Image (cartoon, rainbow, N blue to C red):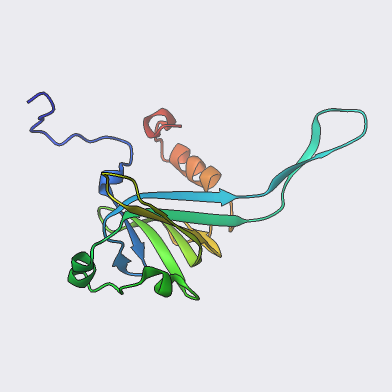
Amino acid sequence: MPGFNQQTLAYKVQSGNSVVVMIGDIPVAFAQTSTQTVDFGTESLYGIGSAKPQEIQQLKFAPTISVDAFVLTSQGIAALSYPANLMSVLANNSFDLHVMDRTGTPMVSFISCVAANFNQNVPANAVITETINFQAMDVLDSTGQSILNGNFALTNVAALATEGVALNSVGL
């Protein structure tokens, strides 16, 4: 078999095969894809006499997350004790959505998410899927801190440099 490898490879990148998407403390069953987006509403401000922006402002914070999942049959819904109508659960409720690595450590958490829209794709001769897009109030990093509470990327790079870690070994 050309793809067989008896050794576990220590890749230095995350893979969707080791990530679980959770609503609160319940894993979302059969989730196939999760897409996270944070729109900062960046706008360039211009002055007289130059085509270059004089300043770039971040005017808003609009985090969103979408979850793509297989649609379960009535037997699948019963086996997992899910409600019969997902849209009734999504309406007028807010959720915390967590993207976890295989050790159970949150990679990113979207807080107080409200369903923005629900899409269902019904193709011929293929599995039916649904996509739920959520808008969130806040996004927490892996340490539980809001991504708006500081410039953690620069702090972490400085800490790595002071510890003598070669920046190219961590992809920087």
Q: Residue at x 20, y 65 (%)?
A: 76
- Looking at the image, residue 63 sits to the left or right of residue 167; the answer is right
Q: Where on the picture, by quarter, is residue 50? A: top right
Q: Residue at x 11, y 33 (%)?
A: 7
Residue reaching furthest to the right: 48
Horizontal and vertical percent position of residue 128? 31, 52
Q: Looking at the image, can residue 29 be seen? A: yes
| Image height of 26 relative to 123, above or below | below
Q: Where on the picture, by quarter, is residue 55? A: top right
Q: Where on the picture, by quarter, is residue 48? A: top right
| Image height of 114 relative to 10, above or below | below
Residue reaching furthest to the front: 124
Front in this rendered view, residue 92 or 102 = 92
Horizontal and vertical percent position of residue 49? 92, 28
- Looking at the image, residue 83 sits to the left or right of residue 36; the answer is left
Q: Looking at the image, can residue 151 be seen? A: no
Residue reaching furthest to the top: 2
Horizontal and vertical percent position of residue 115? 49, 65
Please give the count of numbered marks on the rendered protein.
0
Front in this rendered view, residue 162 or 136 = 136
| Image height of 26 relative to 16, above or below | below
Q: Quadrant of the N terminus?
A: top left
Q: Residue at x 34, y 46 (%)?
A: 123
Horizontal and vertical percent position of residue 22? 34, 62
